Each structure stands twice: as structure tokens, then as C-alpha cells.
Image (cartoon, rainbow, N blue to C red):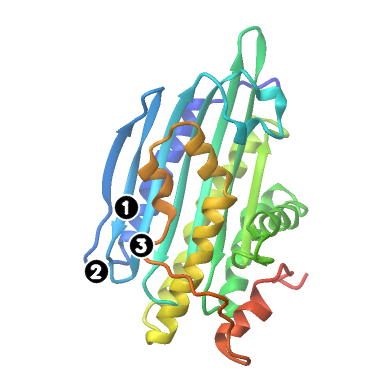
Amino acid sequence: MSQDPEIAAVKQYLLDLQDRICAALAAEEPAARFAEDAWQREEGGGGRSRVLANGEVFEQGGVNFSHVFGASLPPSATAKRPELANRQFEAMGVSLVIHPRNPYVPTSHANVRFFIAKKDGESSIWWFGGGFDLTPFYPFLEDVEHWHRTARAACQPFGAEVYPKYKKWCDEYFFLKHRNETRGVGGLFFDDLNEPDFDQAFAFMQSVGDHYIPAYLPIVQKRRNTPYGERERDFQLYRRGRYVEFNLVYDRGTLFGLQTGGRTESILMSLPPLARWQYNWQPEAGSPEAELYEKYLKPQNWLGN
């Protein structure tokens, strides 16, 4: 690559993105606010975690910025890219998970990140990654279509092939193999992006980050006051258990954070405040809960073209 990455510009964007997302979500809450926790990492770097707890709209939400350094990348980063072994690294990103209180409001996740790996006498290797995905419990087709239309809009300036490619990658990544089901209804996922050059790759990462709030907030606003009872709450907590399973078993970001000695509280802030498991539970035939499994937890073309 001929262009040197502008690390300071990436960091400034990420800090601003964290500010903007927190402000937009906090504006939906009557009383609860994000509490900020700045932290330092012994090996190098640190971050600022922001967590909103016990809100009326958001039962818990975490929006984390981190910028860390290390002498060598962990196995989660080098397993598929052996050329990265024995290189110093620098990693920065914003990662967030929002767990709403109302079961009719989906859980959502977003992440945008930048890595650079350096070795004396050799060119640096850098790349961007990220995406966002939606995990509804009681889905509405119009909400899922809105989410994917916004995801497609984030990709459109970069080519017609980008949305289908990263939508498919999201379906494949957020998949619980031991359950044979997707975590939710997908969105976008990309990694190892360093083409065609730094400016374009950075611009795409920014577009994904900038489209998260337009994708999510209208759904929150539309569903936040939907009446629900104990049945819906129980099912929400049961399905949150799937979220825990994915994050602890498969999620590369979680593994990377733990393997690099990251701050455990910030890494695991993605987990819901409450969840439940029930042995061999099956949804009642013809129920709204069954519809989630039969209609929504399968990769499909939500936009019909």
C-alpha cells in the first residue's frame, strides 16, 4: 500500500462516533444517563467505557472506545493470518451493545475498528473491520427491512456489490452452529479491509459507523411503548441466553480482548444484565415465538432484490 494510514484521524473519528451514539441513545431516556469509566491497560493504551443501566427504554447499554498497543498479536488475530505473527500491534475501535427493556425493541450491536501490525524493516499491515446487526425477539418485517435498507445505503457509495457481500458475511458470522440458527436478522460484517487504499477503506468504515443510529433509533422509537407481559419478558430473557452463548463461544472481538489482557469489564459489557436458560424449551406451534424461529432466524434476502 502506498498510503500511510492516518492513525490520528481514525482515533478522532472513533471518539466522536462514541460521543454521537451516546448522545442519541441518551436522548431517548427520561432519566438514566451513561456513566463513563476511563481505564488504562498495563501493556499499553486504554479506553473509555460508557454504560447506561436501569433505564426505562434501555435496560442496559454499553458503548466502548479502546485504543491498545501490544508486542505481539494473540492467536485470535493470527490463526488465519500467520503473516501477522511476531508483529507489534495497535488496535482501536468503538464497540456497542444495547439491550432494551421492552421485548418488542430488538437488541442491537455495532462495531468499527482499525488494526495496524508493525515489524522493523517491513511494511506495516493495516486493516479496518466492523459492522452492525439486529437481534429481535418479536420481529416486525417493516423494522427488519428498514434496518437492511439503511445497511444497504451505508454501502451504496462504494459499489453495488458491497452490501450483498457484507450482508452474507454477517449472516455467516453471527451464526450459532450448535443451535443451527442465526443470532438475529443480520446486517453488515466486514474485516481485513485495506482496499483500494486507506482513504476509501476509512471512508467505508465511517459510513458504517454513521449509519448505525439511523438504522436503529427509528425502530426503538416505534416499538418502545408496545404493551407486553410476563410471557414476552420470559421469552426475551430466554433469547438473551443465545446472545451470551454467541459472545462467549464465537465472538472474535471477545476472544481478542481476553487474549490480549484487555479490561474484562469493558469486554463483557456486551452481556445482558439478565438472561435465562430452560432445558429443551420449544415454542408453541403457531405462536409469535415460533414465528421468530420459522421466519426470521434464517439467512434470507430481506429487500427482495
Q: Identity of the amino acid at label 1?
A: Val
Work out how far the residue at label 1 is from the one at label 3, CA to CA, in angstroms.
12 Å
- How far from the left and from the top, in percent, is residue 152? 66, 60
Q: Secondary structure at mark 1?
A: strand
Tell me the quarter of the image containing the C terminus. Answer: bottom right
- Residue 139 vs residue 40: left or right? right
Q: Given the current orientation, which residue lies at the most extreme front position?
A: 279
Question: Who comes first in sequence, dot 1 or dot 2?
Answer: 2
- How far from the left and from the top, in percent, is residue 52? 30, 57
Along the viewing direction, whichever of 128 and 82 lies nearer the viewer: 82
Q: Secondary structure at mark 2?
A: loop
User: Is 274 located above or below residue 286 in the figure?
Assistant: above
Q: Given the current orientation, which residue lies at the most extreme bottom position?
A: 286
User: Which residue has dot 2 on it?
Assistant: 30
- How far from the left and from the top, in percent, is residue 257? 48, 38
User: Which residue has dot 1 on it?
Assistant: 51
Mark 1 or 2: in front is 1
User: Which residue has dot 3 on it?
Assistant: 273
- Residue 70 vs residue 190: left or right? left
Q: Identity of the amino acid at label 2?
A: Pro
Q: Given the current orientation, which residue lies at the most extreme left position?
A: 31
Tell me the quarter of the image containing the N terminus. Answer: top right
How would you rate the neighbour count of disc 3 (Cα within 10 Å): few for under 14, some for 14-19, many for 20 or more? some
Question: Who comes first in sequence, dot 1 or dot 3?
Answer: 1
Question: Who comes first in sequence, dot 3 or dot 2?
Answer: 2
Disc marking residue 151:
none
Mark 1 or 3: in front is 3
- Residue 296 vs residue 215: left or right? right
Residue at x 44%, y 66% (from the top left corner): 217
Within the image, what quadrant is residue 132 found in? bottom right
